[in-house]
Amino acid sequence: MKETDVFAVLDALDNAGLTAWVDGGWGIDALIGKTTREHSDLDLVVLLTQVYEVRSVLENIGYNKLLRDWLPVALALADTRDREIDLHPITPFAEGGGTQAQPDGGSFYYPAPVRGVLGGRVVSCVDALTQVRCHVGYEPSEKDHRDMRALHMATGVELPLLYQEP
């Protein structure tokens, strides 16, 4: 997935009046202010109340292959070129954040989005501390280690021991 693909998705959702924040690898790149690596997917935080509208817009621009329907926890779609979009639906709070349902019945809190930059363009994205919180609780890959180190270098966010170099 390229920056232009991300922009096409964000523009389509914005033109439909829908809310989406960039999360995951692209969200980390937005916080850093540049694309740091290739990405196979785009993670988006969306409003649970808008998830079916978001899906419809994405299907209209070619993301019509259903990969996972774990609603209300998550929804993943792909296009014919196997570019994936992973949706993280949240129930919004008045202050701008919200909670995502979790498979165990719990919830994960996302604070209000912050501003990041991709390709010189300002985008709404998940904040650095939440990005770190999303990268714990599993065995990280080398890609995760690189992303977390780059995020730390760019933002100063503190990393858990799991990501600190010996």
Image (tube, helix red, strand yellow):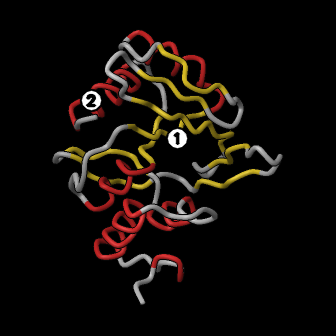
Q: Which mark is residue 5?
A: 2
Amino acid carrying mark 1 in the image: Val
Label 2 with label 1: CB-CB less than 8 Å = no
Residue at the image point whose x is 46% and y is 60% from the top = 127
Which residue is outermost to the left?
120
Inter-mark Cα distance, 2 to 1:
17 Å
Question: Viewed as shown, does residue 105 lie left or right of 139?
Answer: right
Residue at the image point whose x is 22% and y is 51% from the top = 35
Q: Residues within 10 Å of mark 2 (few under 14, many from 20)?
A: few
Question: Viewed as shown, does residue 37 lie left or right of 106?
Answer: left
Judge by depth and name the residue closer to the eye, 150 or 18.
150
Upstream in the sequence, badge 2 or badge 1? 2
Which residue is outermost to the top?
60
Number of marks present in the image shown = 2
Which residue is outermost to the right?
105
User: What residue is shown with label 1?
Assistant: 45
Callout 1 secondary element = strand
Callout 2 secondary element = helix
Residue at the image point whose x is 23% and y is 58% from the top = 33
Percent position (x, y) of residue 155? Answer: 34, 72
Percent position (x, y) of residue 47? Answer: 59, 34
Quarter in which the N terminus is drawn: top left
Quarter in which the C terminus is drawn: bottom left
Which residue is outermost to the bottom?
166
Judge by depth and name the residue closer to the eye, 137 or 139.
139
Percent position (x, y) of residue 118? Answer: 24, 47
Residue at the image point whose x is 45% and y is 42% from the top = 21
Percent position (x, y) of residue 16? Answer: 42, 18
